[in-house]
Amino acid sequence: MQEMTLAGQTKTVGRDVTVGEVMEEIIRDRPYFRRSGGGVTLSGGEALCQPEFAVALLKSVKNMGINTAIETTGYASKEVIASYLPYLDTVLMDIKHTDGEKHKSFTGRDNAKILENARFIAESGARLVIRTPVIPTFNDTVDEIGAIASFAASLPGVRELHLLPYHRIGTDKYPGLGREYTLPDIRPPSDERMSELLYAVNRTGLKGQIGG
Amino acid sequence: MKYYTEPIQKSPRIPFLVEQLYAKAPEIEADRAVLLTEAYRANEDKPIIMKRALAFRHILENIPITIRERELVVGAATKAPRGCQVFPEYSFEWLESEFDTVATRTADPFYISEDTKRTLHEVYKYWKGKTTSELASFYMSPETHAAIEHNIFTPGNYFYNGIGHLTVQYEKVLKVGYAGIIAEAKEALDRLNPGDADYAVRGTFLRAVIISCGAACDYALRYAELADKQARECSEPIRKRELEVIAANCRRVPMHGATSFYEACQSFWFVQMLLQIESSGHSISPGRFDQYMYPYYKRDLDEGRLTREQAQELMDCVWVKLNDLNKVRDAASAEGFAGYSLFQNLIAGGQDKYGRDVTNDLSFMSITATEHVFLPQPSFSVRVWNGTPHEFLIRAAELTRTGIGFPAYYNDEVIIPALQNRGLSLEDAREYNIIGCVEPQKAGKTDGWHDAAFFNMCRPLELVFSNGEDNGAQVGVATGKLPEFDTFEKFYDAYKTQMNYFISLLVNADNAIDMAHAERCPLPFQSSMVDDCIGRGLSLQEGGAVYNFTGPQGFGIANMADALYAIRKLVYEEKKYTLCQFKAAMDANFGEELDGGYCRKLTEKAVAQLVAEGKHVNEEEIKRIFLSMRSNKASEAEKAEYRRLREDINALPKFGNDIDDVDTFARDIAYTYTKPLQQYKNPRGGTYQAGLYPVSANVPLGAQTGATPDGRLAYTPVADGVSPAAGRDVNGPTAGANSVSRLDHFIASNGTLYNMKFHPTALAGRSGLESFVALVRGYFDQKGSHVQFNVVSRETLRDAQANPEKYRSLVVRVAGYSALFTTLSRSLQDDIIARTEQKGF
């Protein structure tokens, strides 16, 4: 459970829930999922960090005939990932950079395991969509995005890549959590830049889109 | 079925026609009233139905006619655009007493010249004692008068006006013309035997039909002559040619069947307009325009006589004309139906009588016409069922996204069985269309009386708390003193007792009005286009239709569900408060100041009274009166206690958040209105069926309702339709929709109304449209009957209040209809802003 400062007041964010409780909420929207083809997406933090709960939940959701997806960094052991895959229709996975050094210096983690896992997921047959946050000074060049796209295009069955332009909606959360926001001066990429990058993605044969 | 789904370019003619229509404020004209009175005077010796036919003919022979600049479809009820005629045969005293305020009032003002005032004043001398409203008043029981006086319900609509609220057999006029209908009436007349006991009634009715239909044909010929004359005088060759075609059209239709799409449009328009010269009823609804017009469109297109662009322009012209009709209502009703709306509901898509989807080109082009014209009429609706093409709903969602408030979405999967349950055949039910706001019926066979009254479900609960007394008078049943209700069941039974009592009085009021219309205003022209009037030899008003209903609306369900839930929890389960404590708190408005708008009105009245007494009232004095009305007289300790109770109420679960316990309760509350009502019969041989929607009456009637146990403050608006109370559905759109779908929409077969409101961003992009369509589908899968949307930001609406001049064309969805936001009263504007705005999916 996390506490944070919101509008000057300390507030507990989130609550402990059981799979059963979450399912009760989910089935309320089943009529709309049925019509939209939508469903349940486990998102961040990192859902791969809570395999026991997440897998049980995904299993229940699938049993209800509802589509499932996960948004993930893909940073986990193969065994953990393998335990999720039978209950996932779609994996939305971040690939932030193909260059190991640069990846490590910005995220604190090497990307070798991530790239390996991407291939592992693609080969498992799940629908894999690659997502790349476009962050000026980190990866917003045609070469860098092009390299990610080429890698993604080399994965079996991967057709889509989403470019997510950097946004500043989370700026206030960091001080609220007592953490430093390390990119205070970065501005969202321009529309022109985003279209250049989209072109670089589409050139690899993938279907690119801006926004998720 | 293959169809053309793409938008079509707008003709430059359309913006011109729209601008011309809105160049001036609408005006009241006296011609019809004068001609009507002349005809009545000349025919005092005739039976009423004959008098009506001869008056209709006299009006159509003499009323001024006009062809507006550049229009292709002609026929106007008034000289000035958007003007209105008046109908003294229904009621007139209200207008006479409002002569000097009707031009300046906030809701739907109309200009009236001094000359017109004088003329109408003369005319009105004839009508004293002869109107439907006076006769209806005579027929009502004393208890009913008391209930109306104490604002339990209001049957104002048909008490003061014509009935309207029907869809006639447009397709029949398109096909055989009035010549065909006259021939049918003559045949029926020939079959009558002078020795029949009912010869007098049936024979006279049929002769009245023949006269009325003949008058319609001659009226069109006047337009043919006018168009010819203008063509001769026109030096501009293109317009000259247009006028010649208009003249030719008016020579053929509506006398004969239409031979082209253009003639069909012209024929349709004459029918639509003439119905509204015959009587003052509103909600005369075109219905399934895309269906009955399609054969003419298809043939012209196939034979290469018409392009899609031309067809679109003609449809757009019809759409503009639907805004040329207008109606003046009394000041109070104008607040309840605000926005100059005539509720001419036109619906696209759906099934044919065999259950096949019949979405066609014209269904899509109806959406395009609404986009092109972008005005409050027609009230545009779409039918949705499992077989509705996805692309049709996506196009509809695109229209929703513009923020015009159209279309309203209707669910075949609820409405068809609901109508069957009321005795319609399966084939008829499948062909339903919507009347006015949300009321389904089978066109050309039904006299539905769909908007028969507004019933405020909050008032009977107030009377439970006061043992049936209101302002010192015993208006309701003496159900007992509060301490006697030692179980919730006893308390709830008392509410049901009050409900049952007032429902019986509501029926008494409607039946009295029904009788008055049959006796004083039978309508032979209207009746000629509804089965089985000619066959039975009876006007609609006397029971000539195949299906007869009376549909009064209940509203305040969300408030009553939350209120009774609060009482059950806090008084009977938790035993935290007594009923007497609730009563004390409500009497003191929960310790809060009284509603500002309400006090402003009280102050205006008090000041007017003082001024009338010859007193001088300065600013200071006005302020003092206002503040004294507003301030709460309770002691600080009492205020604190009342506020604490209200906080406890506010903390309870509320309807609109997908909470099964509360929603099930709401379903049961709705039954206290819908179930007792359906056992009653009307004088036309039909039954009562409930609707659950308030048009915009939730605001003015809320201003007559004290604080309620759901924590609603005194004189503030009551919840609209079946929607959750404003601001209380806080769990998002799908939770709200789930709650509303838990009500029984089948039994409320006169229609339910659910308002949702979105930021335009919620529908952005293709994915926004897809989510939106899924929401509508998902709600309908759970058996909701109707849903409509306002797509506009709260900020935009606030800005429109501050700078109305910038937002003259801003259309919002009010209730069963859309209206120009800036023409609405301030309190209704506030209510629209307060309805929960959903941020997205």
Image (cartoon, coloured by chain):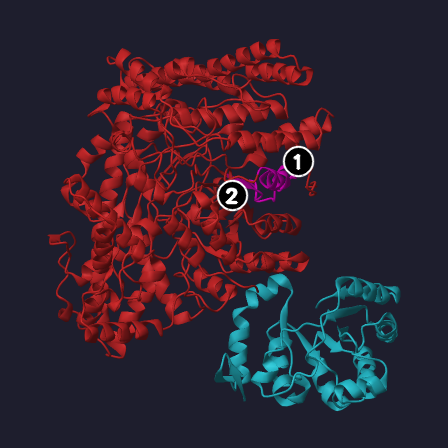
Chain colours: A cyan, B red
Residue tagged by mark 2? B430
Q: For this view, does B483 lie left or right of residue A37? A: left
- Tell me the subunit letter for badge 1: B
> Does the magenta segment cover residue B371?
yes
Residue at the image position 61 percent from the left and 83 percent from the top: A174
> Does the magenta segment cover residue B215?
no
Instruction: Name the residue nearer the viewer: A11 or B645.
Output: A11
Disc 1 and disc 2 in contact, CB within 8 angstroms: no
Mark 1 residue element:
loop
B251 relative to B623, above or below: above
Q: How many numbered circles are shown?
A: 2
Q: Residue B764: x percent and y percent?
A: 64, 57
Q: What residue type is labelled 1?
A: Lys
Q: What residue type is labelled 2?
A: Arg
Mark 2 residue element:
helix
Quadrant the C terminus of chain B occupies: bottom right
Give the mark nearer the N terminus: 1 vs 2: 1
A206 relative to B508, above or below: below
Residue tagged by mark 1? B10
Q: For this view, does B38 lie left or right of residue A170? A: left
Question: What is the spatial separation of the Cα atoms under label 1 and label 2, in whole angstroms?
Answer: 33 Å
Instruction: Name the residue nearer the viewer: B331 or A38.
Output: B331
Q: Residue B608: x percent and y percent?
A: 21, 43
Q: In which quarter of the image is residue B12?
A: top right
Quadrant the N terminus of chain B occupies: top right
Same chain shared by disc 1 and disc 2: yes
Q: How busy is the neighbourhood of tag 1: few (under 14 within 10 Å), some, or many (20 plus)?
A: some
Q: Residue A207: x percent and y percent?
A: 81, 64
* Residue stretch in magenta: B346-373
